[in-house]
Amino acid sequence: MKFSKTHKIANVLSTTANGYGMECAELKGDRLYATNGRAMVVIPVDLDEGDVDGAVPRQALVEAVKAPAKASASVRANGSVIVDTKSGPLTMPRPDDLNFPNWDLIKSEASGDEITFKIGINAKLLLDLAKAMGSTDSVVTLTVHAKEGSGTTKPIAVDVRGSDASGFVMPVFMR
């Protein structure tokens, strides 16, 4: 699969294994999904022959973006994951025992016809999400949906100018 090097999707993945798929992105059709439990990004990918759905380790995505002399990052995702690096091909196993979040449910919960209100957001997390979505100027648009008087437990939709990626920030309750 190939994706734009401006999509720094590894920024939104957990750096430690937790068994919930947050240390790996999930290739599902022509989309690559990533989350750390607080933010989620979905980017479009161009599939190569032989690519199959499943886990893509964080390190493979980091190495693919660092690969020299290519406009797009490239990862071969079949039985294992193979990334071309400066020192030659790097092969990694694809974990098959991870429990990925229900991406479709998260996306559907981030929309609706409820009222909007002010929220507080971790600026570094939002910047990491914008970079993961391919933003070149770090400008984002947030869409918040909630029922009057109830607060929100729904994901907050994030859009960046010039990107066809989808992003979501999970709500955080402040006291």
Image: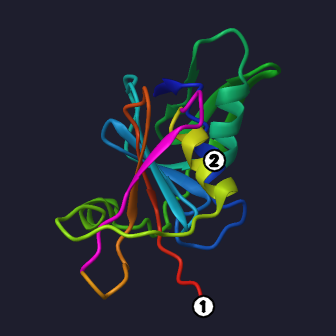
What amino acid type should be assigned to the residue bearing mark 1?
A: Arg
Q: Which mark is residue 9?
A: none
Q: Earlier in the sequence, mark 2 or mark 1?
A: 2
What amino acid type should be assigned to the residue bearing mark 2?
A: Leu
Name the residue located 21 percent from the left edge and 70 percent from the top edge. Answer: 114
Name the residue located 44 percent from the left edge and 31 percent from the top edge. Answer: 161
Q: CA distance from mark 2 to mark 1?
A: 24 Å
Q: Residue furthest top?
A: 69
Find out whether the residues at labels 2 and 1 contact each other: C-beta distance under 8 Å. no
User: Looking at the image, which is closer to me, 164 or 159?
Assistant: 159
Name the residue located 24 percent from the left edge and 62 percent from the top edge. Answer: 108
User: Looking at the image, which is closer to me, 174 or 66?
Assistant: 174
Name the residue beneath numbered marker 1: 175
Q: In the picture shown, does residue 14 fall above or below 62?
A: below
Residue stretch rendered in magenta on the structure: 135-147
For mark 1, give the secondary structure. loop
User: Looking at the image, which is closer to me, 93 or 157?
Assistant: 157
Q: Nearer the viewer, mark 2 or mark 1?
A: 1
Q: In the picture shown, does residue 171 fall above or below 103?
A: below
* Disc 1 crowd, CA 10 A, few/some/many (<14, 14-19, 20+): few
Q: In the picture shown, does residue 49 fall above or below 36?
A: above
**Image x and y of residue 58, in percent:** 64, 48
Name the residue beneath numbered marker 2: 127
For mark 2, give the secondary structure. helix
Residue 51 is a magenta residue: no
Q: In the picture shown, does residue 129 fall above or below 172?
A: above
**Image x and y of residue 160, in percent:** 45, 37
Q: How is the image coloured?
A: rainbow
Residue 40 seen anywhere in this rendered image of the structure: yes
